[in-house]
Image (tube, helix red, strand yellow):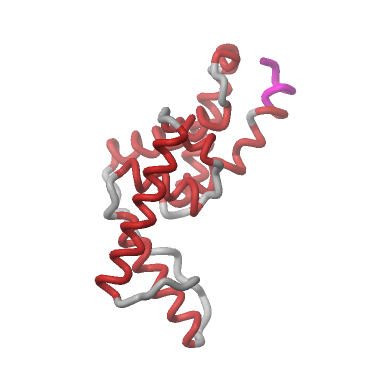
Amino acid sequence: MDSEEFQNIILPLVEKMFPLARRLMKNDVDAEDVIQEVMMKLWHNRNSWEKYSNPIGYAIRMTRNAFLDRIKKSKPELSAEPLEFSQKYETDQIYDEREASKIIYKIVSELPEIQRLVLELRDFDGFEMKEIAESLKIEISYARVLLSRSRKIVREKMIKNYGYERRTI
């Protein structure tokens, strides 16, 4: 693979990798560092790239593994809370949405890892089920089951612990 092919095939994957890296790292600077590490590894392995049938899944897995490597090395403090808005005054609706969002992030962070990953990749990052299944090396039907179970757990915990009924947030 030459540099032109790399630019046409691999570089566009950054748009899919960055939201995952940002969510995992909890800030843009560290997310950019992870993406840079992954892109360097992809560049160094560019000659063996053809053996991978799913470039998106491979790049996502590399992003996740780079995050896990950083965790092993540094053991940083990670928060499950979403980024704060910079507005000085908030309406009740924005406040309610923020509180519900914090609760959902907390519940999602307590899910088993595979269920959490499937839910985050699908609902937070917008990946297709096929991409999720290939990147996690599971069957599509199993990915759908995991997504359904994780959504059910989140919904039940919202209703049980916080009195939220089914509604759009």
Query: Which one is in front, 67 or 141?
Result: 141
Height in image: 89 above or below 75?
below
Q: How many marks?
A: 0
Q: Is residue 102 left or right of residue 42?
A: left
Tell me the residue at 37%/61% (across/down).
105
Q: Position of residue 109 (x, y in %)?
A: 31, 55
Tell me the residue at 50%/80% (across/down).
94
Residues in magenta, as a range: 1-6
Q: Is residue 129 magenta?
A: no
Tell me the residue at 43%/80% (across/down).
96
Height in image: 136 above or below 101?
above
Whether residue 89 is visible to the viewer of this picture, yes or no, is no
Q: Position of residue 28 (x, y in %)?
A: 50, 52
Quadrant, the N terminus? top right
Q: Is residue 3 magenta?
A: yes
Whether residue 139 is visible to the viewer of this picture, yes or no, is yes
Query: Which one is in front, 144 or 137?
Result: 144
Q: Position of residue 89 (x, y in %)?
A: 51, 87
Query: Which one is in front, 162 or 13?
Result: 162
Height in image: 156 above or below 25?
below
Instruction: Name the dominant secondary structure of the magenta segment.
Output: helix
Height in image: 90 above or below 159?
below
Q: Position of residue 149 (x, y in %)?
A: 34, 50
